[in-house]
Image (spheres, grey):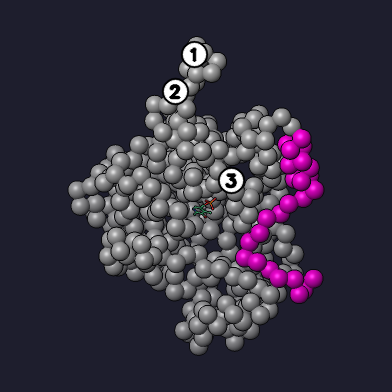
Amino acid sequence: MTDAILPYGRQTIDDDDIAAVAEALRGDFLTTGPTVERFEQAFAEAVGARHAVACANGTAALHLAMLALKVQPGEAVIAPSITFLATANCARYVGADVIFADVDPASGLMTPATLKAAIGKLAGRRLRAVLPVHLRGDACDLPELEKLAYQHRAVLVEDAPHALGTTAKFGNVAETIGDARHSAMATFSFHPVKTIATGEGGMVTTGDPKLAERLRLLRSHGMVRPPKADLWWYEMPEPGFNYRLPDILCALGLSQLAKLPRFAERRRALAGAYREALAPLAPIVRQAAQPAYSDPVLHLMTVLIDFAAAGTSRREVVEALKAEGVLTQVHYIPVHRQSYYRGLYGEQDLPGADAWYAKCLSLPLYPGMADEDVGRVVAALKAALRL
Ligand SMILES: *Cc1c(COP(=O)(O)O)cnc(C)c1O
């Protein structure tokens, strides 16, 4: 299968996943049914959170988090510039301003220093939330980010779709990303490239029962059924959305979640193989810097490439790799460079984000890859860089 095309990421769906969906289809509930709660409970347990609320996708999870916190128009939310669009957009959905934080150009992560700099740009606006992104699967420095947010009476909302399975050791305490120990909430996505897949799907975890209740309300139109009311009765204290995750997809999610240990082990093994195979390509190719406290299950195999020093360009390398059946992706184009945000906030100088963007490239990484595939990717990269 050496000619097979290697995407940068893809789902692993087995026969038992298909059987789980088929069973849900034969059941009484295609949407809101008992599997939703089962998936939520299993997910909460897997990441060590008190509550988990399933929703339509990772973007809806972020939107629900902003709504649950009652973030108001004109207030401020800080997001790193190196992330997917949705991390910033969720603030705009509720009329809040996005302040883009720079990132460490070696790790791509928002750091206490870059958060401090972003807080310096509040210009009188009230800071409500800081959204750390555990880029590619490496954890952000949550205790320090939390301290900084707390000084402004703001909370962390972790955008964690890359970091399902990641653990981090802050001091002597080992924590699982998603346990929401340092944050008000953490959000996940089950898009097919993510660590577990439901097609579309998302989750919000929290330790706060009031936030969990609000999230449940807001994902289903804001409808409340008071306990002693008539059987047909419902009330709507505030409008919500239809952001539910159907029973069918929760059945798939449950089945996928049971495989998380296996997926994580496979991702760790492949990342280890990449580390070894890429070492001789230094200093032209380096792995994204892993913080000492982070023990990641990598979602993305992101490398930093000095294209200029290799006498080539990213475009040439991406196309040469594609010709060999190796598909890559760039994570990410700095969000502050998007025309919408340029129009809204003007040009901004975030040198760490620009430096990261200039060099980053994500190589194929997913549990279905064979060991030989790593060698094939690295050989193709070496040839493309004429090393
Ligand atoms: C995938 C992703 C999202 C959005 O998730 P969807 O399920 O595609 O809506 C948001 N943030 C990050 C960092 C992501 O990787």
Observer-nearest residue: 171 or 74? 74
- Give me the residue at 40% from left, 38% from top: 67
Front: mark 3 or 1: 1
Image position of 173 (left or right of 336): right
Tell me if the residue at label 3 has its CB under 8 Å from ligand 1. Answer: yes
Please state the horizontal and vertical placement of residue 330, each as a whole percent of the image. 52, 68
Q: Mark 3 — residue?
A: 201
Q: Residue furthest front?
A: 232
Q: Which residues are magenta?
A: 1-26
Query: Are the residues flagged by discs 2 and 3 in contact, CB closer than 8 Å?
Result: no
**285 above or below 136?**
below
- Give me the residue at 35% from left, 36% from top: 70
Q: Under tag 1, what secondary structure?
A: loop
**72 above or below 231?**
below
Q: Mark 1 — residue?
A: 229
Give the CA distance from mark 3 to mark 1.
32 Å
Observer-nearest residue: 32 or 273? 32
Q: Mark 2 — residue?
A: 235
**127 above or below 211?**
below
Query: Are the residues flagged by discs 1 and 2 in contact, CB closer than 8 Å?
Result: yes
Q: What is the three-letter code of the residue carrying label 1?
A: Ala
Question: Of marks 2 and 3, which one's residue comes earlier in the chain?
Answer: 3
Crowdedness near tag 3: few (<14), some (14–19) or many (≥20) residues, C-alpha within 10 Å:
many
Observer-nearest residue: 20 or 231? 231
Please state the horizontal and vertical placement of residue 378, each as a whole percent of the image. 65, 75
Q: Residue furthest left?
A: 124
Say if the magenta span includes residue 7.
yes
Q: What is the three-letter code of the residue carrying label 3?
A: Gly
